């Protein structure tokens, strides 16, 4: 039986998550900062389509990337070395979320509905949601956003307007967060794209054990201070 949430920011045990659809745990509630933070600290995230109630998930296995296992293809390594670009953090958070929310195809739909955009912007205002942005000649061309608690980072979505722009942001994110002591980055669901970058599936129990350590760790003061330029001076 799926739990229906009330006004309290609490969730049922993860053991009650369904096997099919994989990880569905609860329905309802709201997208307040308090509930979202309570969810992420337990390895739960919201994901629902327009017109649906809020659905809360904790799939097993879980897609994660451990920074030392990042894979950079030859072509991507060449782009990182030779392209003109700049990568920043939190310079255009709302713009990144709205770009991620845009349908991938004309007339298509998106799971990042307006209430999700506003919810993560509220988290950003409180210092918990962050974006990595790729710029070319001052124009935002790609990026990603997610939630950071302690030394744990939960990736949400990415977008790209030019070739490799989101991958460039992703590589810089992984390398920077590794320098900040992040042991694991949540990628939520398996995709071939994430697998090609080094992400792997882990059991829910292993994921939750690692996130508990990360969420309880002190966050470095420079965690969200990043500005890299690969453009001529």
Image (cartoon, rainbow, N blue to C red):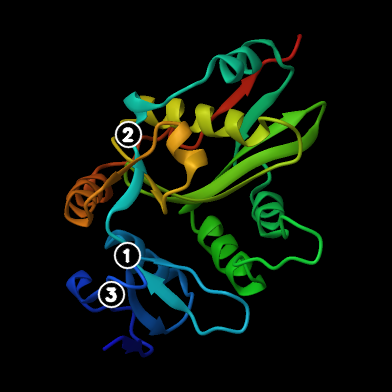
Rendered view: 197 above or below 49? above
Q: Residue at x 52, y 39 (%)?
A: 193
Tags 3 and 2 touching, CB below 8 Å: no
Question: What's the CA distance linking mark 1 and mark 3?
Answer: 9 Å
- Of residues 92 and 174, the one nearer the viewer is 174
Disc 2 element: loop
Question: What's the CA distance linking mark 2 and mark 1?
Answer: 19 Å
Residue 107: image location, x then y, percent = 80, 66
Query: Which quadrant of the structure image shows residue 208?
Result: bottom left
Q: Residue at x 76, y 34 (%)?
A: 162
Question: What's the CA distance linking mark 3 and mark 2?
Answer: 26 Å
Q: Residue at x 40, y 83 (%)?
A: 27
Q: Residues within 10 Å of mark 3 (few under 14, many from 20)?
A: some
Q: Quadrant of the C terminus?
A: top right
Q: Residues within 10 Å of mark 2 (few under 14, many from 20)?
A: some
According to the image, label 1 marks what residue?
58
Q: Which mark is residue 18?
A: 3
Tags 2 and 1 touching, CB below 8 Å: no
Tell me: 49 left or right of 68: right
Which one is in front in this view, the residue at disc 3 or the one at disc 2?
3
- Of residues 189 and 92, the one nearer the viewer is 189
- Of residues 227 and 166, the one nearer the viewer is 166
Q: Which mark is residue 66?
A: 2
Q: Earlier in the sequence, mark 3 or mark 2?
A: 3
Query: Which quadrant of the structure image shows residue 29?
Result: bottom left
Rendered view: 191 above or below 133? below
Tell me: 10 left or right of 104: left
Q: Residue at x 54, y 56 (%)?
A: 124
Query: Which quadrant of the structure image shows residue 64?
Result: top left
């Amino acid at each position: 039986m799926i739990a229906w949430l009330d006004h309290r920011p609490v969730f049922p045990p993860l053991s009650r998550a369904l096997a099919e659809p994989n990880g569905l745990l609860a329905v309802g509630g709201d997208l307040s900062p308090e509930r979202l933070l309570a969810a992420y600290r337990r390895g739960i995230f919201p994901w629902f389509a327009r017109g649906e109630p809020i659905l809360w998930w904790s799939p097993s296995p879980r897609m994660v990337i451990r920074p030392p296992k990042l894979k950079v293809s030859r072509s991507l390594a060449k782009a990182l070395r030779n392209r003109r670009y700049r990568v920043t953090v939190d310079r255009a958070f709302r713009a990144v979320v709205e770009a991620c929310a845009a349908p991938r195809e004309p007339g298509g739909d998106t799971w990042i509905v307006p209430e999700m955009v506003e919810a993560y912007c509220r988290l950003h205002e409180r210092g918990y949601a962050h974006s990595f942005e790729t710029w070319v000649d001052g124009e935002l061309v790609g990026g990603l956003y997610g939630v950071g608690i302690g030394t744990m980072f939960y990736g949400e979505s990415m977008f790209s307007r030019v070739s490799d722009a989101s991958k460039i942001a992703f590589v810089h994110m992984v390398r920077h967060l590794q320098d900040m002591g992040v042991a694991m980055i949540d990628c939520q669901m398996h995709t071939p794209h994430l697998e090609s970058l080094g992400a792997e599936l882990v059991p829910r129990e292993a994921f939750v054990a690692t996130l508990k350590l990360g969420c309880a760790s002190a966050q470095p003061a420079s965690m969200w201070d990043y500005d890299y330029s690969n453009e001529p001076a």
